[in-house]
């Protein structure tokens, strides 16, 4: 059978996809014991707040259960908290995770309904709306409401808990010491502060070389010892008063201003800031901190925090499901890319093979080109700062519609593109032109007979839309049934909200230079295809390894220094650039897949256009789908 390999590949992809759905849905619902419901709430201004509710089936008005409200960190999305939601809900807790305003599935605030900061000084970013909604639930044990936040989410939830002390049982801060302004002199709720020993965000601010200094901060010790008569400020300064040194894992008991007893506990798991959500030590610490205080769901044999390794975890099966879902999407896009070139409409896109004008393999110049492609991406990676206000001295802050890391990533891509183009021009005029390098051999051909054919460009764009659209539709199908997007470590992806359409178009144009210049730089290595799928796949592997090797090595060094030595590389320590260190993972996945698509399709068609459009569409989707939004339009 002529199409047998394609049919087998499709069956394998669908099997992987089915397994991914099984793992995501099964683990999320604790294999039928928990109901997961996607909710869209509206603020007082009419803005949407996207919420995911995990409700144990045994929870009802006659059997109320504790409720945990969990906020993700900055520029993340609610799926990032899924590990905690899964582990708590299977232990009998109702859990509510949400995208706070302007992030992922929640709207940018159009009014002030969520901006009322209250006495804590912090805006609520959706918590006011959620609080109104949960009061309609009849299955909540109102004596045990827990608020918890990672990083910036800790700031919002801690502020909320401070403003609702008479209703909150416990606040859990995960990463950094978000404790509120010095003017607040009562914290009538149980408090758990979790800070990893290799938390890069805290290390960048630490007084000294370790995160232990953060547990000696004046503001935190005031809460732990219920001592508000000492002078305090809102800084990260180590306490100068004679308050005792905090002891890790010890449960402190204090009497609140209301006369009731409350606990405070500090934990320091072996974890870094960005990976709390996928790190077993951190997850077990959170589970112990909550279950040991509430008295529900503590694992058998766990009598103290010393036994935390006995806490059972299943959330990794859920994360495996995410990884398989992404693999299925990539596989389907590859199959569609091949299948389209066999149709009569797109067959004409396969042009004649071009002359190989790259440096002779293994020659000195070839090795120089290879070294540059490997070294330049990590070498230029941390130029600038967060957010990126200027690029080459030009003010570019007005360009950004997205918040978070995107400004730095795009400026890095632009700088890399300029360097690549400059190197390519040097190559062309001193080598390529003399050896037959021209418009066609560099991949810009749109026809075998015409100088330029606009219909080819339009067809190439349609080709890219269909290829990437196939992966998009598969994810849309998965999202409908799992009620979730996906995340792999710090890589996030979900379907696009309609109000991000203009953002997508803007960032599509912004992403073109990187993928175009990368394709041209690859020409210097002379790794050409012969029109066969086998060779195309082989070259995808080679070029992907070359393009990503430098960044991958940089990420490994960054993580090893953090996890083994609690040390941030100097290049990541200034201007909050530590965020870009862990940000290499989404770069490796997002750009890696885009480059693979680009190389594969370019090798199959012998033209730069179909691969370029496909890669840019994929790259733009990964950037715009989840990242926090500053504004929808200029």
Image (tube, rainbow, N blue to C red):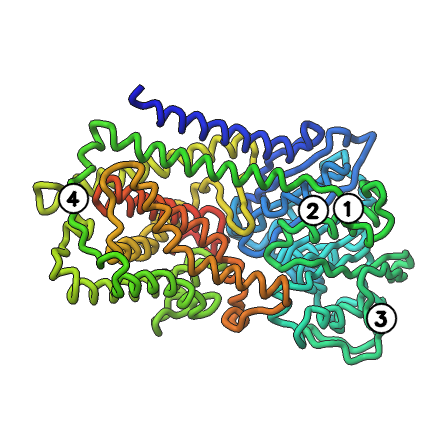
x 48%, y 53%: residue = 629
Cα distance between the residues tagged 1 and 3: 25 Å
Mark nearer the N terminus (1 vs 3): 1
Look at discs 1 and 4 and give the one toward the viewer: 4
Q: Earlier in the sequence, mark 2 or mark 3?
A: 2
Identify the secondary structure beneath mark 4: loop
Looking at the picture, tell me which residue is in the foreground, 301 or 55: 301
Asked if one can make out residue 93 in the rendered structure from this viewpoint, the answer is yes
Residue at 35%, 52% (x, y): give it. 506
Q: Nearer the viewer, residue 259 or 563?
A: 563
Looking at the image, which is closer to me, 184 or 348?
A: 348
Q: Which residue is mark 1?
A: 145
Residue 121 in picture, x, y percent from top left: 67, 64
Could you give the CA–CA distance between mark 3 and mark 4, rounded to whole angstroms?
Answer: 74 Å
Task: Point out residue 10 in the picture as x, y percentages from the top left corner.
Answer: 41, 27
Neighbour class for label 1 at 10 Å: few (<14), some, many (≥20)? many
* x and y percentages locating residue 575 in the rendered image: 51, 71
For residue 205, above or below residue 492: below
């Amino acid at each position: 059978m002529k199409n047998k390999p394609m049919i087998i590949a499709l069956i394998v992809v669908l099997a992987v996809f089915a397994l991914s759905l099984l793992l995501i849905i099964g683990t999320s619902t604790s294999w039928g014991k928990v109901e997961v419901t996607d909710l869209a709430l509206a603020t007082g201004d009419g803005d949407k707040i996207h919420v995911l509710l995990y409700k144990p089936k045994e929870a009802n008005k006659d059997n109320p259960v504790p409720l945990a409200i969990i906020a993700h960190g900055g520029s993340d999305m609610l799926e990032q908290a899924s590990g905690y939601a899964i582990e708590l809900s299977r232990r009998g807790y109702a859990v509510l995770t949400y995208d706070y305003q302007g992030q992922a599935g929640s709207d940018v605030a159009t009014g002030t309904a969520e901006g009322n900061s209250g006495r804590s000084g912090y805006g609520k970013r959706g918590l006011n709306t959620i609080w109104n909604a949960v009061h309609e639930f009849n299955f909540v044990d109102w004596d045990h409401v827990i608020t918890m936040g990672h990083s910036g989410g800790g700031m919002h939830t801690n502020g909320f808990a401070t403003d609702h002390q008479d209703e909150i049982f416990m606040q859990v801060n995960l990463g950094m010491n978000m404790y509120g302004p010095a003017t607040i002199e009562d914290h009538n709720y149980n408090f758990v502060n979790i800070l990893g020993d290799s938390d890069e965000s805290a290390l960048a601010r630490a007084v000294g070389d370790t995160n232990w200094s953060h547990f000696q901060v004046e503001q935190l010790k005031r809460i732990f010892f219920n001592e508000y008569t000492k002078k305090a400020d809102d800084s990260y300064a180590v306490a100068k008063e004679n308050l005792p040194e905090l002891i890790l894992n010890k449960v402190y008991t204090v009497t609140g201003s209301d006369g009731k007893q409350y606990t405070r506990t500090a934990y320091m798991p072996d974890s870094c800031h960005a990976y709390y959500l996928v790190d077993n030590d951190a997850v077990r610490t959170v589970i112990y901190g909550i279950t040991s205080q509430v008295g529900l769901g503590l694992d058998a044999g766990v009598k103290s925090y010393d036994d935390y390794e006995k806490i059972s975890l299943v959330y990794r099966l859920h994360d495996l499901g995410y990884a398989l879902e992404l693999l299925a999407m990539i596989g389907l896009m590859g199959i569609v890319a091949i299948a389209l070139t066999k149709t009569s409409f797109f067959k004409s896109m396969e042009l004649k093979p071009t002359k190989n004008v790259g440096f002779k393999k293994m020659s000195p110049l070839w090795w120089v080109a290879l070294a540059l492609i490997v070294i330049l991406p990590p070498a230029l990676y941390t130029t600038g700062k967060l957010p990126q206000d200027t690029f080459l001295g030009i003010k570019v802050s007005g360009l950004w519609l997205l918040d978070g890391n995107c400004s730095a990533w795009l400026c890095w891509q632009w700088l890399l593109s300029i360097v690549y183009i400059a190197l390519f021009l040097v190559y062309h005029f001193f080598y390529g032109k003399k050896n037959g390098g021209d418009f066609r051999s560099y991949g810009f051909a749109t026809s075998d007979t015409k100088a330029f054919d606009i219909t080819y460009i339009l067809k190439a764009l349609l080709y890219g839309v269909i290829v990437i659209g196939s992966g998009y539709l598969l994810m849309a199908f998965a999202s409908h049934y799992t009620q979730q997007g996906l995340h792999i470590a710090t890589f996030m992806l979900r379907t696009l909200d309609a109000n991000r359409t203009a953002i997508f178009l803007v960032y599509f144009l912004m992403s073109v230079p990187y993928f175009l210049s990368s394709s041209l730089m690859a020409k210097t290595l002379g790794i050409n295809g012969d029109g066969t799928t086998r060779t195309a796949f082989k070259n995808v592997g080679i070029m992907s390894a070359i393009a990503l090797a430098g960044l991958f090595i940089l990420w490994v060094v960054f993580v090893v220094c953090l996890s083994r030595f609690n040390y941030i590389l100097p290049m990541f320590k200034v201007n909050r650039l530590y965020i870009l260190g862990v940000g290499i993972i989404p770069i490796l996945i997002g750009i890696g897949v885009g480059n693979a698509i680009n190389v594969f399709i370019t090798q199959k068609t012998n033209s730069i256009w179909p691969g370029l459009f496909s890669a840019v569409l994929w790259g733009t989707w990964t950037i715009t789908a989840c990242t926090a939004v500053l504004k929808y339009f200029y």
